[in-house]
């Protein structure tokens, strides 16, 4: 067995999504005080009979009634009933609770939250090949719709795993609310557990690559495109989201429809991987990225912060991923609206065991330079900088 010793459908995620990332967010403190390192993580679970499905990714969106929508990529239950495999799923939690009620069909099987078309399901052979429609980030629009980016891949398992990017686009989901449930009864969506709807179908081509990680701010939705350890920012106003000609790239000074003029994001140290989701923290009034170094499988995560989604980004600050197995972890995501005070809540998927999605609350602190053009800095218990020991001591250059 290789280190990808998982069920057949999960192996692609360990290989591809180890290079994908997502986002994180933080808490402000005035001066560098020692903080304890996170020592525990908790696994996201469901109610029986879906208490421990295999899954990864794990984006979250705060809902208007205080609940939380969780969105996952490949999700399966292979050894207990109900047995199923979908390339996306979703569940609802009460506030910060990590026990989910999955959106299911009448048989109690999780629905495919980003439903594949018949043509995308055609030719699927378990253990050999399938077409995946994977979520790559989500954000809430001013009208209440939840916007979900997706990437579509042709996954070939034999003779060796290969992943071919086919297209990317957007789904939308309007949360219908939940009806009251009797004691011990299942909570059902008022909308009958409907999936998301296609909104901008396959607007990104293989030449474009996956345009991912949407975050809404000040009338625009910002996305990132990362390749070869270089990241770029692209945006559209809300009315233009379904029209690819409405998108503009950050050039270093303004926004242009000409992709050849795009400017690379700058990072104070280290770099994230292929899909570093960018999140907005209302607590910090900052944007945040979470990933592993270069997106590789790791037992250590990294955080960056910035005043703008295009940067400049801070130096990286590292933190441990508790209960991460020897095979490493991947698909880090940040959950700013569900972070306890003084911490940043980050989720990650385990490689080699499961995969399961686990959550850790990372104590963090922020330094905000007086110069608004300067990048803010983030510190954790075990800041990655060589001059910072695990006591959050300030670096000489901060």
Image (tube, helix red, strand yellow):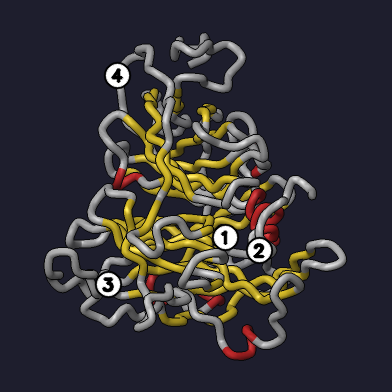
Mark 4 nearby-residue class (10 Å; few <14, some 14–19, many ≥20) = few
Q: Residues within 10 Å of mark 2 (few under 14, many from 20)?
A: some
Residue 175 numbered mark, or none = 3
Spatial distance from mark 1 to mark 3, Cα to Cα? 31 Å
Q: Secondary structure at mark 4?
A: loop
On residue 128, the disc is: none
Earlier residue among tags 4 and 3: 4
Q: Is residue 336 visible?
A: yes
Left or right: 154 with respect to 17?
A: right
Q: Residue at x 47, y 76 (%)?
A: 112
Write the residue at 50% across / 35% down.
Answer: 304
Q: Which residue is mark 1?
A: 249
Question: Which one is nearer the viewer's eye here, 263 or 388?
Answer: 388
Whether pointer 2 and pointer 1 mark residues with C-beta atoms closer than 8 Å, the reply is yes
Q: Earlier in the sequence, mark 2 or mark 1?
A: 1
Please rate how many residues cluster around mark 3, counting C-alpha atoms within 10 Å: few if below 14, some from 14 to 19, many from 20: some
The residue identified by callout 2 is: 259
3D distance between C-alphas at marks 3 and 2: 35 Å
**Horizontal side of residue 344 vs 377, given as left or right:** left
Residue occupying image coordinates x 55% and y 30%? 316
Against 335, is 59 above or below?
A: below
Q: Gap between marks 4 and 1, in whole Å? A: 35 Å
Q: Residue furthest bottom?
A: 118
- Could you say whether the residue bearing mark 1 is in a helix, strand or loop? strand
Q: CA distance from mark 4 to mark 2?
A: 40 Å
Find out whether the residues at labels 4 and 1 contact each other: C-beta distance under 8 Å.
no
């Amino acid at each position: 067995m290789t280190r990808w010793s998982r069920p057949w459908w999960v192996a692609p995620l360990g290989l591809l999504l180890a290079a994908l990332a997502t986002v994180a967010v933080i808490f402000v403190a005035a001066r560098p005080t020692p903080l304890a390192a996170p020592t525990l993580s908790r696994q996201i679970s469901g109610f029986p009979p879906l208490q421990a499905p295999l899954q990864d990714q794990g984006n979250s969106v705060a809902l208007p009634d205080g609940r939380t929508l969780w969105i996952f990529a490949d999700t399966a239950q292979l050894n207990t009933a109900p047995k199923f495999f979908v390339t996306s799923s979703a569940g609802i939690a009460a506030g910060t609770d990590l026990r989910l009620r999955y959106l299911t069909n009448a048989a109690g099987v999780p629905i495919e939250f980003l439903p594949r078309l018949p043509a995308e399901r055609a030719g699927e052979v378990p253990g050999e090949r399938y077409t995946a429609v994977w979520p790559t980030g989500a954000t809430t629009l001013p009208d209440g719709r939840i916007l979900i980016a997706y990437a579509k891949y042709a996954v070939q398992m034999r003779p060796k795993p290969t992943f071919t990017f086919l297209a990317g686009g957007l789904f939308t989901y309007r949360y219908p609310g939940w009806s009251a449930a009797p004691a011990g009864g299942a909570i059902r969506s008022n909308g009958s557990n409907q999936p998301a709807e296609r909104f901008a179908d396959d607007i990104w081509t293989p030449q474009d690559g996956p345009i991912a990680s949407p975050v809404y701010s000040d009338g625009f939705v910002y996305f990132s495109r990362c390749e070869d350890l270089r990241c770029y920012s692209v945006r559209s106003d809300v009315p233009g989201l379904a029209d690819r000609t409405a998108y503009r790239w950050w050039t270093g000074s303004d926004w242009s429809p000409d992709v050849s003029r795009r400017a690379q994001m700058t990072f104070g140290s280290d770099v994230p991987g292929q899909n570093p989701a960018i999140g907005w923290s209302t607590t910090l009034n900052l944007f945040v990225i979470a990933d592993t170094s270069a997106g590789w499988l790791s037992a250590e995560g990294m955080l960056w912060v910035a005043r703008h989604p295009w940067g400049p980004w801070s130096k990286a600050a590292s933190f441990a991923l508790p209960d991460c197995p020897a095979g490493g972890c991947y698909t880090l995501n940040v959950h700013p609206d569900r972070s306890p005070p003084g911490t940043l809540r980050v989720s990650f998927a385990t490689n080699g065991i499961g995969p399961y999605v686990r959550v850790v609350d990372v104590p963090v602190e922020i330094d905000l330079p007086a110069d608004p053009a300067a990048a803010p800095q983030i510190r954790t218990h075990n800041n990655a900088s060589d001059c910072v020991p695990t006591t959050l001591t300030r670096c000489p250059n901060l």
